[in-house]
């Protein structure tokens, strides 16, 4: 099960200062438990017992669910694009070339600005990146993520498959330029992730309009555009992988977290040179979830409880799931309609099976 470490200073910035026992009781709301506490550093270790809620694997995710558990308002995010309404991107585009289809076929991206990243927030973002890509992304096989200094990037950005022997750059944590194949042999990250691309004819690469390389997903960022530091105010976030819904959902989770950190979310248009389940173009963050209806009587039979409409809706909203009651007079039934908000997809995907 995922374990995260958060700083009590940031956890309690928007929550009451609870005792450890009170916190432990509250964590039931997130299907989580206290795993340790360092009084000197203020570090709180938490184990999450639900792998279907990756939106909770961060400080902001936990603050969100605990706030809702106290009766707080459902968060509203205005930056999502949908089939009905797509935000303008002001020229921010990622072109996914046909050469990337075999290596790593799907990508989502967005940019942020307007907030100076501090050291604790950077550490939390890196932890979210690692947990999402390791646990949810199957050790970066199906989902990987990169954070970049967008002030140094020039659009359009290109995601493509390249010759691993003829393409080189200086990887993060090193000072010498290496080809992608050399990175797979010499860089410490190769021991963990290099095997994902071994055997491919073309390796995935992300580069901007100036031909500056951002990263070699899913292995390593570049040492310049990919070296995010505390104090940065403008970032570009990219998620790539082999399962499109997982890639797009991961982008949604990160966008919501970063919005609540204080960043303005800037949409990015992703354009494919081939067909995908979501089409050839989508503006990210992209809202793709559909609502689901459950008969109220079925819910009550399953729980063994008689609940009012208001109680049913409140219980769902406390878990960051939009809900409302729908009446079907022709079928003599009342349904609980669950609105699958960006952060609630996986709990419902499991319920629906």
Image (cartoon, helix red, strand yellow):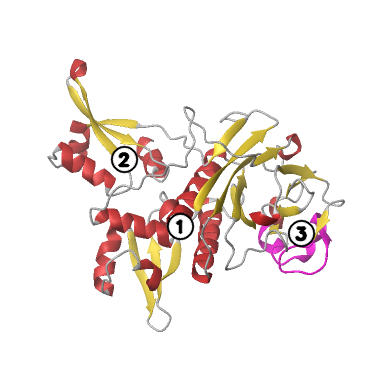
User: Viewer-proximal residue, 339 or 283?
Assistant: 283
The Cα–Cα distance between marks 1 and 2, rounded to whole angstroms, is 23 Å
Q: How many marks?
A: 3
Query: Compared with residue 137, is residue 95 higher up or lower down, i.e. above or below?
Result: above
Q: Label for residue 262?
A: 1
Q: Give the residue pinned by disc 2.
A: 322
In the rendered view, does 86 fall on the left or right side of 33? right
- The residue sitting at 12% across, 40% down in the picture is 306
User: Viewer-proximal residue, 284 or 205?
Assistant: 284
Q: Are marks 1 and 2 in contact (CB under 8 Å)?
A: no
Q: Give the residue pinned by disc 3.
A: 184
Q: Is residue 306 magenta?
A: no
- The residue sitting at 61% across, 38% down in the picture is 269
Badge 1 density bin: few <14, some 14–19, many ≥20, Cα 10 Å: some
- The residue sitting at 78% across, 62% down in the picture is 170
Question: Mark 1 or mark 2, which is nearer to you?
Answer: 1
Quarter holding the N terminus?
bottom left
The Cα–Cα distance between marks 2 and 3, rounded to whole angstroms, is 45 Å
The Cα–Cα distance between marks 1 and 3, rounded to whole angstroms, is 37 Å
Q: Which residues are magenta?
A: 170-193
Check disc 3 and report its element: helix, strand or loop.
Answer: helix
In the rendered view, does 128 fall on the left or right side of 161? left
User: Viewer-proximal residue, 93 or 127?
Assistant: 93
Residue 101 in the image, given as x and y percentages of width and height: 70, 37
Residue 64 in the image, given as x and y percentages of width and height: 35, 55
Q: Is residue 177 magenta?
A: yes
Badge 3 density bin: few <14, some 14–19, many ≥20, Cα 10 Å: many
Badge 2 density bin: few <14, some 14–19, many ≥20, Cα 10 Å: many
Check disc 1 and report its element: helix, strand or loop.
Answer: loop
Question: Mark 1 or mark 3, which is nearer to you?
Answer: 1
């Amino acid at each position: 099960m995922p374990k995260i470490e958060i700083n009590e200073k940031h956890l309690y910035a928007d929550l009451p200062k609870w005792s450890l026992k009170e916190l432990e009781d509250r964590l039931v709301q997130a299907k989580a438990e206290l795993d340790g506490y360092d009084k000197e550093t203020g570090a709180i270790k938490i184990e999450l017992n639900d792998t279907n809620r990756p939106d909770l694997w961060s400080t902001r995710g936990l603050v969100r669910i605990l706030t809702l558990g106290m009766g707080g308002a459902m968060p509203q995010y205005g930056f999502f694009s949908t089939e009905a309404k797509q935000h303008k991107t002001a020229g921010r585009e990622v072109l996914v070339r046909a050469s990337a289809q075999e290596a790593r076929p799907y990508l989502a991206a967005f940019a942020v600005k307007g907030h100076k990243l501090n050291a604790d927030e950077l550490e939390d973002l890196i932890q979210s990146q690692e947990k999402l890509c390791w646990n949810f992304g199957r050790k970066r096989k199906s989902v990987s993520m990169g954070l970049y200094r967008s002030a140094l990037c020039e659009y359009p950005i290109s995601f493509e498959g390249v010759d691993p022997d003829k393409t080189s750059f200086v990887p993060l944590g090193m000072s010498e330029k290496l080809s992608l194949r050399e990175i797979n042999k010499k860089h410490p990250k190769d021991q963990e992730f290099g095997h994902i691309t071994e055997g491919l004819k073309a390796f995935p690469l992300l580069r901007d309009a100036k031909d500056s390389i951002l990263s070699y997903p899913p292995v390593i960022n570049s040492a310049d555009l990919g070296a995010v530091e505390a104090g940065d105010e403008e970032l570009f976030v990219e998620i790539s992988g082999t399962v499109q819904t997982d890639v797009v959902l991961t982008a949604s989770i990160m966008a919501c977290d970063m919005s609540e950190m204080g960043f303005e979310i800037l949409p990015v248009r992703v354009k494919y040179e081939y067909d995908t389940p979501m089409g050839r173009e989508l503006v990210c963050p992209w809202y793709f979830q559909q609502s689901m209806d459950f008969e109220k009587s079925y819910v009550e039979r399953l729980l063994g409880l008689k609940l009012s409409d208001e109680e049913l809706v409140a219980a769902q909203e406390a878990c960051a799931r939009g809900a409302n009651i729908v009446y079907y007079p022709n079928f003599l039934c009342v349904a609980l309609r669950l609105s699958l908000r960006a952060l609630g997809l996986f709990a419902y995907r499991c319920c629906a099976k």
